[in-house]
Image (cartoon, rainbow, N blue to C red):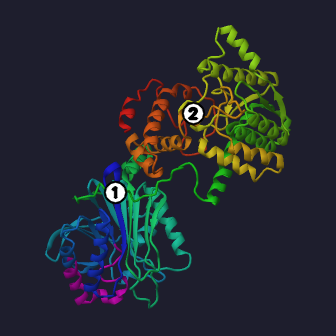
Amino acid sequence: MTDYGYFRVSAAVPRVKVADCNSNVSAIVEVVEKAAAMGAEVVVTPEMSITGYTCADLFHNTLLVDRVVTSLEQLADKIVNLNIVAVVGAPITVGCRQYNCAVVIVGGKIVAAIPKSYIPNYCEFYERRWWHPADDLLSTIAIGRFKDVPFGRNQLIEINGVKVAVEICEDLWSAVPPSSRHSLAGAEVVLNLSASDDIIGKYSYLKKLITLQSARCMSAYVYAGAGYGESSTDLVFDGKAIIAENGKLLKEGVRWQSAAQVVVADVDVELLRRERILTTTWGDTAAREVNVSYNIVTVDVESNTNCELLREINPMPFVPSSVDDMEERCNEIINIQVAGLAQRLEVTHTKQLVVGISGGLDSTLALLIAVKTFNRLQLDCKGIIGVTMPGFGTTGRTYNNALTLMRALGITIREIPIVDAVNQHFKDINHDPSVTDVTYENSQARERTQILMDIANQVDGMVLGTGDLSELALGWATYNGDHMSMYGVNAGVPKTLVRHLVKYFVDVVDNENARVALDDIVDTPISPELTPASADGTIAQRTEDLVGPYELHDFFLYHTLRYGFKPEKIQYLAQRAFPGREAEISKWIKVFFRRFFNQQFKRSCMPDGPKVGSVGLSPRGDWRMPSDASSSMWQENAN
């Protein structure tokens, strides 16, 4: 699959018979056919899959040596019409030396043989008894009727424009795996043919090793390990099949199966390339460390661009999926926020903090962080001045929740209604208060900010900002109103995560009234409450009705900033993450990019605030963009 930069890979574990090459060829053909039918462009099988890994001294038997060659010829013939590159394991004899090799077969031809670099000779492994380690020499060899086959470890197989490298089992466990150098030389996908036996705790360690190597190499990593059928004289093999990408486990097979298995996934090569461009040290390291010549074997196979994406798309990329991960993530974010605010308070010798409390999610999180920070600094929480400022749209629900929470947390409470002051302002600027337009709304936001700033001057304190990352992305803040503060503690937290952070506090606060208020705040519709409430006193102005669902906007934001994807690819992913919402996605993605571009001027002068995740919008850090950049290309690219 090449649409949107995806490349389909497969790790296959055939059921082998030790030293029975004919049977093993049939078993390999079976899994290669299955991988090809699933649309894979490359499939990797385990180490020594042609013979079985556990042949021991039979590897030097003349019959087996000869049969390996004829079996590779037969295999090439049997898969000649399959649109797939097959990488199989076999002992290859070159002169008077035998090597543990990956043999690359496509279109009925052997196009490369890649020997293992590091030959283990410790504990249960004694491979030096049979095989020699590879060196940096590149040559050509004959394998049966296939003449001039490129032979050497420094080779890349370019498949449909994607560069693929190979290493074998122990290579991964070495201090400097060959895949590190291969990746610096351009490999985007690494295949590993392995015959790693299973012992207690090894699988968990191996998964970490694979995912971390994929992260270090900024590559995909496809691992196929020997399974059922290998000799159990001294060892047992569980049939590992693992696919990782840039530090994430994409897919793993089911171990301990007696039947063959094929694991397939789509890796995002576009993502990997962008990561390498973004990480400037990648290119610097490549220039310094790659000092050998590489042979590039170029092949093309027909890929099925119409097949369904074999990749899980998380609809909430900022939100961990498991309860344990969520608790850990919330604790980490809160500690980052508290540490940032504590540093700012200590450096400025500030013991008074002013926070506008609306009864909504963002101001609630800011207040909870403020209290936790004061406790850490052993400051009196009365130094936190919570100011509630009822206006034209304030409902009893948010008003009561704000007061209940402030009382429960033991901070100083100030209530300053803004209706009279704003009405006077309307008279001053000759604005009709019955016209509930942007002037009507922003006048309230600026009045509230003026009150907070003036109180901060009054008490020699600072104003704590409450706006979150999603609002910054959309520009959903009044310029020089709630857009401004002395420190924006929520600036790195997206809206979809704010709700979970507030939920987290429900279980950790020790006041029942606070817990009740927090529960209701979590369930309250998101609203700036700047227009009059409904006749029944409920919230009439709902933010997501105006700018769109935050779950969609956070999805767009994450894939735009984290990976730099085109709008059409983001839309493609969103349609799979949110099935049945195609029209909604098409509408709001255009809104997102329009607002994201034309609201940059607000971000260019945003207050300081801590970065908490991989995505940030600080003009001093992660995101620098001209305020007058055009969004036309992005609008046109969104379908």
Would you say residue 487 is visible in this rendering?
A: yes
Please give the label number shown on residue 7.
1
* Position of residue 458 in the picture relative to residue 21 (left or right): right
Between the C-alphas of marks 1 and 2, the distance is: 34 Å
Q: Which residue is mark 2?
A: 472
Q: Label 1's element?
A: strand
Residue 526 falls in which quadrant of the image?
top right
Q: Label 2's element?
A: helix
Would you say residue 346 is visible in this rendering?
A: no
Q: Position of residue 175 (x, y in %)?
A: 46, 65
Q: Main secondary structure of the magenta part?
A: helix
Residue at x 47% of width, y 51% of height: 577
The amino acid type found where label 1 is placed reads Phe
The amino acid type found where label 2 is placed reads Leu
Residue at x 46% of width, y 26% of height: 626
Q: Is residue 159 above or below residue 147?
A: above
Using a 10 Å C-alpha cutoff, classify the residue at mark 1 as few (fewer than 14 neighbours), some (14 to 19) or many (20 or more): many
Q: Which residues are magenta?
A: 45-72
Dividing the image into 4 quarters, which one contains the N terminus?
A: bottom left
Please give the label number shown on residue 480.
none
Residue 246 is inside the magenta segment = no
Q: Nearer the viewer, residue 111 or 327?
A: 327
